[in-house]
């Protein structure tokens, strides 16, 4: 006996599992209903039932094979073949129905019909069995081909998996940026900060068409509003990136701080008239370079000593933006209140008193003090009409011919304190 292949073995086991046990009582009841002594009818009856069972089994085999076959490459899993289940009650009903039909017809007609059905059913079963064998052969070839392809693919994947499949973390966090100010002045430097020190590639977008990969400091060349944001990307993958929050930066204008000045001489004094070109700003501050200052739009200032003075003007606008301009002013003559360097207090009515000539025209409050060479005070006055007459004011004695030092302290017309000093020679 030839060994069955797995497919035939499966079919055999399914058919055996649905084999019915022989029941004598059933057949006895049927024979009682049949005409007596008709042995030929019994023979054809058994043949018809057998052929019917074979046809049903072959039809089920063909149906399962067709549904499990794909004209292209199909992988067949034998575990997926549906179970063939025939209940005994169904076969009994079919047999009884067949017996009743045979009893209602003539014996000759039944024999002819049964012979014809047996021939057709046998032919149909043989064709199905042949087709099933061909289908089984095709399935076996397809399974073998698929198994070869799977083995080949496993070899390729096993040899190249490390080179062809690499897990890469492309997650880029969304960072938060802040700035030292949201309103700045034109030309002022903006400082930006990011809440991360991770090793990413940063690209700052300052909103004015300027981008910087490194610096987080920026100054604008035009006033306006600018949206600043930060692009963060991976070091080795520029396609993996994220954008930070946006910061709106307002750039305000700065005021014009240019000024002009004019030098004039008044009673031997060098006086400078200053003028700020634009007078519509709330805050101005002049620095005359000699320790004096003013907040007027058009001040004037007197320089007492010759030399070069750096005068500056600082102005600020309503946005808090400020600007400063500076110019150097040259003074060629010293102004010592037009004080003489000597006098002769001899009572002849000529040059008998010492008083700086400028005090006579300045109309300011002052104090003039005279000291001898030892530092002793010999005279003091607050009246422009009471000059020093050469006497020691405290001892009422006439001072000797010698060199003395005078000092004048006053408050000028701008409310500023000034101090002047110089030598004076007493002659007889």
Image (spheres, helix red, strand yellow):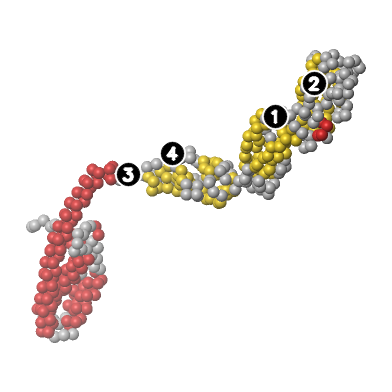
- In the picture provided, is 382 more to the left or to the right than 117? right
* Residue hosting label 3: 166
Tell me the number on the disc at residue 333: 1
Query: What distance separates the C-alpha of mark 4 from that of mark 1?
Result: 66 Å
Picture quadrant of residue 30: bottom left
The residue at the point 83 percent across, 14 percent down is 401
The residue at the point 11 percent across, 56 percent down is 3
* Relative depth, front residue between 28 and 337: 337
Residue 22 visible within the image = no
Residue at the extreme left? 1
Query: What distance separates the C-alpha of mark 2 from that of mark 3?
Result: 102 Å
Task: Quarter of the image for the C terminus: give it.
Answer: top right
Tell me the number on the disc at residue 388: none
First along the sequence among labels 2 and 3: 3
- In this view, the mark in front (2 or 3): 2
Q: Find numbered disc 3 in the image and state the secondary structure of the residue it sits on.
A: loop
Query: What distance separates the C-alpha of mark 2 from that of mark 1?
Result: 19 Å
* Residue hosting label 2: 342
Q: Find numbered disc 1 in the image and state the secondary structure of the residue it sits on.
A: loop
First along the sequence among labels 4 and 2: 4
First along the sequence among labels 3 and 4: 3
* Residue hosting label 4: 199
């Amino acid at each position: 006996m030839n060994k069955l292949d797995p497919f035939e073995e499966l079919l055999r086991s399914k058919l055996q599992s649905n084999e019915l046990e022989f029941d004598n009582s059933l057949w006895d009841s049927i024979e009682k209903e049949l005409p007596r002594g008709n042995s030929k009818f019994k023979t054809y009856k058994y043949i018809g039932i057998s052929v019917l069972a074979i046809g049903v089994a072959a039809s089920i085999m063909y149906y399962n094979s067709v549904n499990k076959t794909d004209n292209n490459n199909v992988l067949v899993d034998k575990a997926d073949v549906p179970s063939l289940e025939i209940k005994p009650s169904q076969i009994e009903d079919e047999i009884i129905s067949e017996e009743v039909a045979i009893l209602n017809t003539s014996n000759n007609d039944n024999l002819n019909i049964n012979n014809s059905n047996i021939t057709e059913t046998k032919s149909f079963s043989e064709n199905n069995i042949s087709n099933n064998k061909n289908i089984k052969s095709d399935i076996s070839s397809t399974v073998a081909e698929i198994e070869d392809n799977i083995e080949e693919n496993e070899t390729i994947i096993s040899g190249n998996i490390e080179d062809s499949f690499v897990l890469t973390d492309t997650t880029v966090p969304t960072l938060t940026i802040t700035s030292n100010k949201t309103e700045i002045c034109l030309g002022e430097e903006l400082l930006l900060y990011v809440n991360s020190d991770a090793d990413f590639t940063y690209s700052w977008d300052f909103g004015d068409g300027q981008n910087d990969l490194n610096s987080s400091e920026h100054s604008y060349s035009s006033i306006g509003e600018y949206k600043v944001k930060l692009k963060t990307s991976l070091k080795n993958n520029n396609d993996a990136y994220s954008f930070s929050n946006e910061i709106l930066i307002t750039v305000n204008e700065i005021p014009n701080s240019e000024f002009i000045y004019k030098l004039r001489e008044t009673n031997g004094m060098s006086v400078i008239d200053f003028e700020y070109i634009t007078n519509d700003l709330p805050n101005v501050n002049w620095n005359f370079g000699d320790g004096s200052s003013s907040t007027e739009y058009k001040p004037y200032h007197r320089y007492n000593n010759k030399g070069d003075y750096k005068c500056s003007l600082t102005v600020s606008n309503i946005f808090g933006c400020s600007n400063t301009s500076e110019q150097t002013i040259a003074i060629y003559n010293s102004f010592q209140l037009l004080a003489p360097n000597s006098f002769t207090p001899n009572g002849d009515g000529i040059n008998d008193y010492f008083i700086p000539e400028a005090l006579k025209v300045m109309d300011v409050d002052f104090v003039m003090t005279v000291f001898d060479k030892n530092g002793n005070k010999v005279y003091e006055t607050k009246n422009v009409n009471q000059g020093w007459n050469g006497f020691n004011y405290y001892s009422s004695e006439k001072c000797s011919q010698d060199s003395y030092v005078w000092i004048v302290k006053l408050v000028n017309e701008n409310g500023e304190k000034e101090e002047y000093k110089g030598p004076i020679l007493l002659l007889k």
